[in-house]
Amino acid sequence: MPAHILPTTVVGSYPQPEWLVNRAMLSKVVPRTRLHDMWRLPPEHLEEAQDDATIVAIRDMERAGIDIVTDGEIRRESYSNRFATALDGIDGDNPAMIVARTGNTQTPVPRVVGPVRRKGPVELHDMQFLRENTERAAKITLPGPFTMSQQAKNEYYKDEEELAMALAEAVNAEALDLQKAGADVIQLDEPWVRNNPELAKRYAVKAINRALQGITVPTVVHLCFGYAAVVPGSNKPAGYSFLAELDDTTADQISIEAAQPKLDLGVLKDLSSKKIMLGVLDLADPAIESVDTVAERIRNGLKYVSPDRLVPAPDCGMKYMPRATAFGKLKAMCDAAAKVRREVG
């Protein structure tokens, strides 16, 4: 892990190449079920192509100066569907329809039709491949149990809490394997806690803590207001409806979107026991921010969080962006972090 303060990272995803995926198809949806038609290569060539694209993503992050890299989530159609649909008890081939997170469209989701169990490793190869191809600190991401429970139609468990706890056990088994494979950081993506805060207040912390049980490497919980390409800024609230509660999780870090919604960073005082992975790149802005702009966002975070507790990052995953823009933004962020690092000594 980086020894210096203000280590930089990414939330998870990096742009997938046009030669690998149909980006026009991808731009229309954040799939909950499998979207096999998205991939441009036949199955017999797909894994090799995904390996190659993953190396490109890792090298871009390294060239930009990222301290804690990921595999770019290159093998995934979305941040959550690949893991969720790999579990026993999940029927992803005969989806149900639920109201999308944006509240104005219907989206197909997997149905829970039996006991949810992990059949075997899902992301283990991803982590092994990442570990083999970088000497930098390596982070792997998993969908959180609360979010997955909200992205499925429960037709088996007595209630959503029971479903979330079953999903938490599956996530935990996966996380333990990823830790053994060399993960330096493990992150749970839980954006739906703020989408349904009343339900989240009942059992989200309990489910997150079960998912992280026995994990000894640093852990992160990420929440955001949605991909900028899918959820316009005009639809995003000015603050989180479920945030302070995450101080009760066993996670070491909380990752929040702050740049695009111009979040009042005073909310960080509610997370006094955590490191903060602070979103300092506005992914709705097609322009590459200047180093000074990003540095000022980092300085604003330091008004509420000590330098040893702040981790600069993009607001969210970058998969919907043009690759050149994503790289430029990461480079600006890394240069800005270095600048502020020198200022605070």
Image (cartoon, helix red, strand yellow):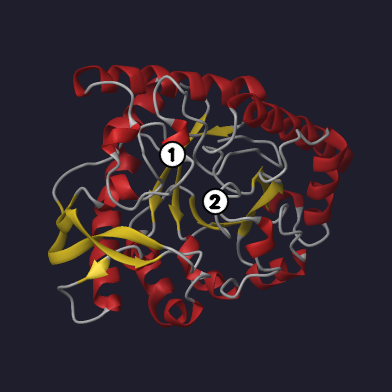
Residue under label 2: 230
Q: Can you identify the residue that label 1 sits on? A: 26
**Badge 2: residue crowd in 10 Å (few <14, some 14–19, many ≥20):** some
Q: Secondary structure at mark 2?
A: loop
Which residue is at a point 64% across and 24% down the rendered structure image?
324
Q: Quadrant of residue 73?
A: top left
Please tell me which residue is depicted at 47% across the width and 34% down the height of the picture. 24
Q: Nearer the viewer, residue 90 or 122?
A: 90
Give the percent coordinates (x, y) of residue 105.
44, 63
Q: Residue at x 29, y 55 (%)?
A: 171
Question: Label 1 neighbourhood size at 10 Å, few (<14), some (14-19), many (20+)?
Answer: some
Relative side of 62 to 329, left or right: left
Q: Earlier in the sequence, mark 1 or mark 2?
A: 1
Residue 293's place in the image compared with 261, above or below, is above
Q: Is residue 174 visible?
A: yes
Q: Residue 289's x, y, as percent?
A: 79, 36
Task: Determine whether the residue tagged by mark 1 lies in a helix, strand or loop.
Answer: helix
In the rendered image of this protein, does residue 326 appear above or below residue 144?
Answer: above
Task: Report the amino acid beneath label 1.
Answer: Leu
What is the number of callouts on the image? 2
